[in-house]
Amino acid sequence: MKRHIVVLTGAGISAESGLSTFRDNGGLWEKHSVYDVATPEAFVRNQELVLRFYNERRRQLATAQPNRAHQLLGELEQHHRVTIVTQNVDDLHERGGSSHVIHLHGELTKARSSVNPELVYDIGYRDIEPGDFCELGQQLRPHIVWFGEEVPMLEAAADIVRTADDLLIVGTSLQVYPAAGLVHEVDMDVPITVVDPGEPAGVSRARVIRKGAGEGVAEWAASFLARR
């Protein structure tokens, strides 16, 4: 019977593909405060700025490529059941070969209605402009979970984590809640490995590989496959 590997990922895994992280820049993301570009109030206050900001992120994503860590996680599906639970809004896991990905904080390649969150549209890497409307005649917004909004996929992610046979954590500081709380949903007998070059918080019983995402996932994969 295939083991179920659940992988929690954060900005650190995408940073190796050249995508900037928010928390490594003193609370700024591409020189913008979170309060200017990542809250519902910001969208009401300055819709044009918010749309332009995410259009730029989408264009950047279109030129980025999955890195070694993304590809190794995708290859694991050849022999194991693998579910990725990511805080990232990019599509690098999917392009790296992973077919079971839960995006906690939304997806950059999708737009949604500003009045009905159930109306979600695939847009790929194209821009969202003022005047781009949903079928209800209302402005489209990025399909992103902004600060102050609920995380609709959180319970589904918690259910997945509870079924893990192995838990791998890559590129996340485990300091952003509610996502960081997912690690506490795993059974006590489930092995936990954290790949982080810094000082990860919150998992005292985890094995820690103090390396970057690509190198660390490769080390974990080699040891994991040797044990099977």
Image: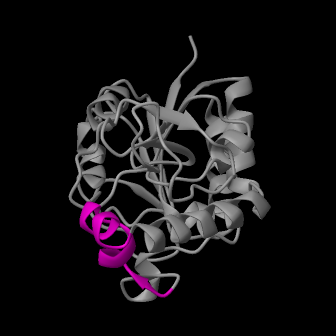
Q: Position of residue 165 (x, y in %)?
A: 43, 28
**Going 69% across and 67% down the picture, which residue do you hit?**
60
Say how many tags the image has: 0
Left/right placement of residue 185 relative to residue 84 reads left
Q: Is 34 within the magenta? A: yes
Left/right placement of residue 100 relative to residue 105 reads right
**Going 59% across and 53% down the picture, which residue do you hit?**
90
Above or below: residue 142 compared with residue 55: above
Q: Main secondary structure of the magenta part?
A: helix
Q: Quadrant of residue 73?
A: top right
Q: Which residue is more in the foreground, 53 or 219?
A: 53
Q: Is residue 175 visible?
A: no
Q: Position of residue 169 (x, y in %)?
A: 46, 52
Q: Is 78 within the magenta? A: no
Left/right placement of residue 128 relative to residue 95 reads left
Q: Is residue 213 visible?
A: yes
Above or below: residue 11 compared with residue 119: below
Q: Position of residue 224 (x, y in %)?
A: 61, 40
Q: Position of residue 200 (x, y in %)?
A: 37, 68
In the image, the segment drawn in magenta is: 31-46
Above or below: residue 20 compared with residue 63: below
Q: Which residue is more in the foreground, 78 or 120?
A: 120
Looking at the figure, which quarter contains the N terminus?
A: top right
Q: Quadrant of residue 138?
A: top left
